[in-house]
Amino acid sequence: MKSIEQVKELLKDFSFPFGPESVPLDEAAGRFLYEPVASPVDVQITGGEQFLLSAGKEFLAGGMLGPYELSLLAVAGFSRVMVRSVCTLGLSVDKPQLLQTAIAGIRRAGGWTETLDPRKSAGESPFSLTLMSAAEVDLPSPWTHVFSGLNLIPAQETACFRHPDGRIVFCLPESILVWQVIIELLIRPLLWRMNGADYQSAVLCGTATEDFPVLPEPGCIPLIQTASDMYRVAGLPETFRECLPPFSTGFLHISPGSLPPKTGDSLRIIPW
């Protein structure tokens, strides 16, 4: 049985070449900067003697471009910027809710998606990275088995395969909880790292209002906020309805060797 931490180590050598692409500033939101940017001019702070930007000095080193970064580029006089080419992921899913979950999560991570025919084998996908809903998949040689047995909720295992040409396939159970967790803890960090940036999950800090259940194996528990900074278990769902907003706020990842929280314990929740 693999833990999230062990799988992250296995994925560290995965890489795709994302080449440069010049785009207008109004199309650059959510894209990753290809190279550091230096200001061509001095930009003085209004009403003061200090400089917001200095000519010839780097003011953006890399990472995803958001409103703040784009405003700095505009102030410096840029109309276009060099970004990394977009990573398009193939999705082989026959459940609409899973498809919506995957598309939303991957686009927030800086990637794009294309839906594949779920009746076809994952090995037929032309994409470098494919997520598919499949209970049991065994791709033939030359595909190699990267990992299996990542069990985030009981009896819902995840597996991964890799092709010599660089293609990767994640086989996930038909569980919205598992898809949300995998995209947040594995796919987003993988996309960011391949784009030269470090991804850190947003974390909510709170307090447990009850004793949390003991899981048969390390995994994830969906939580819901009951009051300011107070959280309880949303459920250990059979249908996973409780895992979706507004039925839950986020999830708590129970690492191997960790005990479930007790009433009053501090929590670090990863929000949806």
Image (cartoon, rainbow, N blue to C red):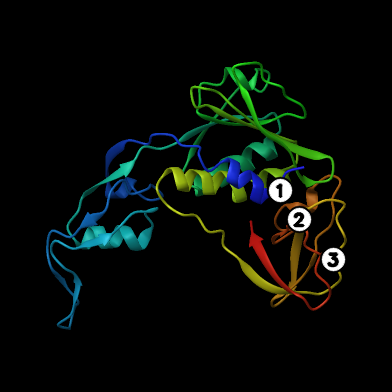
Q: Residue 71, percent across and down?
A: 29, 61
Q: CA distance from mark 1 to mark 3?
A: 20 Å
Residue for point 69% across, 62% down: 249
Question: Looking at the rendered structure, which numbered label has been put on residue 116?
Answer: none
The quarter of the picture where the N terminus appears is top right
Label 3 packing within 10 angstroms: few (<14), some (14-19), many (20+): some
Q: Residue 207, percent across and down?
A: 74, 75
Q: Are marks 2 and 3 in contact (CB under 8 Å)?
A: no
Above or below 22: residue 41: below
What amino acid is at disc 3? Answer: Phe
Q: Residue 33, percent across and down?
A: 33, 49
Residue where numbered disc 1 is placed: 3
Q: Of marks 1 and 3, which one's residue comes earlier in the chain? A: 1
Q: Secondary structure at mark 2?
A: loop
Q: Residue 126, percent across and down?
A: 51, 21
Label 2 packing within 10 angstroms: few (<14), some (14-19), many (20+): few
Residue for point 76% across, 57% down: 222
Residue for point 31% across, 44% down: 83
The quarter of the picture where the C terminus appears is bottom right
What amino acid is at disc 2? Answer: Pro
Q: Are marks 2 and 1 in contact (CB under 8 Å)?
A: yes
Question: Looking at the rendered structure, which numbered label has been put on residue 212?
Answer: 3
Name the mark nearer the viewer: 2 or 3: 2
What amino acid is at disc 1? Answer: Ser
Residue where numbered disc 2 is placed: 256
